Amino acid sequence: MSFQESLQKLCKTVPGARAAWVMSTDGISVAQHLEGDLGPMDLEALLVELGGPIKSLRNGLSLAQAGTVRSLELQTELGVVVLRMLNEEYFVALILEPGGLVGRGRFEVRNHAVDLARELA
């Protein structure tokens, strides 16, 4: 299954999903699927900016010998970003509207991450 098909399927399985994205921590967009209007949110800019903190977290966890970053969740008044690392360089992000099913989103992102990581290999 291609990135595009996987991201589309991910969005279709989570009520309230607005978009799904595969991106590198360096800010390079690999694939995206938009489910509708994102409103005023510049999602690509947000995900590019999250690359730096992800790298910092990874370094901090390494120094503390606390393992590696697997997933993050960011909630704002405009929505929720559920992010899961695919490997050291790439992550998948699912963007939900406010009131979207965050728990279902985390579950589906975790399940789809396996196929997406295979696509990167």
Image: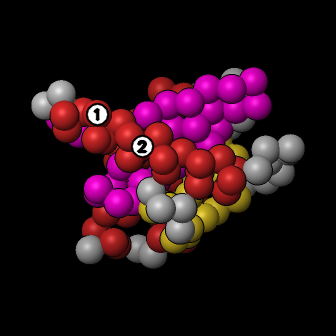
Give, as a single range, the part of the protein colored magenta.
67-96
Residue 47 at least partly seen: yes
Residue 94 in the image: state x and y as whole percent.
Answer: 55, 46
Which residue appears at 39% of the width and 59% of the height? 90
Badge 2 is on which residue? Answer: 54
Could you tell whether 41 is left or right of 108 in the image? right
Q: Earlier in the sequence, mark 1 or mark 2?
A: 2
Name the residue nearer the viewer: 73 or 96.
Answer: 73
**Which residue sits at x=54%, y=45%?**
50
Relative to 118, residue 13 above or below: above
Q: In this rendering, is residue 11 above or below 53?
A: below
Q: Which residue is drawn at 53% across and 68% down?
A: 28
Left or right, 36 with respect to 30, comes to right
Q: How many numbered circles are shown?
A: 2
Q: In which quarter of the image is residue 74?
A: top right
Q: Position of residue 117 (x, y in %)?
A: 31, 63
Query: As shown in the figure, which amino acid type bears the numbered disc 2?
Result: Ile
Residue 15 seen by the camera: no
Q: How crowded is mark 2: few (under 14 residues within 10 Å), some or many (20 or more)?
A: some
Tell me where residue 43 appears, x and y as whole percent.
Answer: 70, 50
Q: Tell me the SS state at disc 2.
A: helix
Q: Is residue 76 found inside the magenta-colored segment of the image?
A: yes
Q: How far apart are marks 1 and 2 (CA)?
A: 10 Å
Q: Which residue lies furthest to the right in this view?
A: 40
Circle nearer the viewer, 1 or 2: 1
Left or right of 8, for residue 53: left
Q: Which mark is residue 60?
A: 1
Q: In the drawing, does residue 110 fall left or right of residue 121?
A: right
The local secondary structure at tag 1 comes to helix
Q: Residue 117 carries which label?
A: none
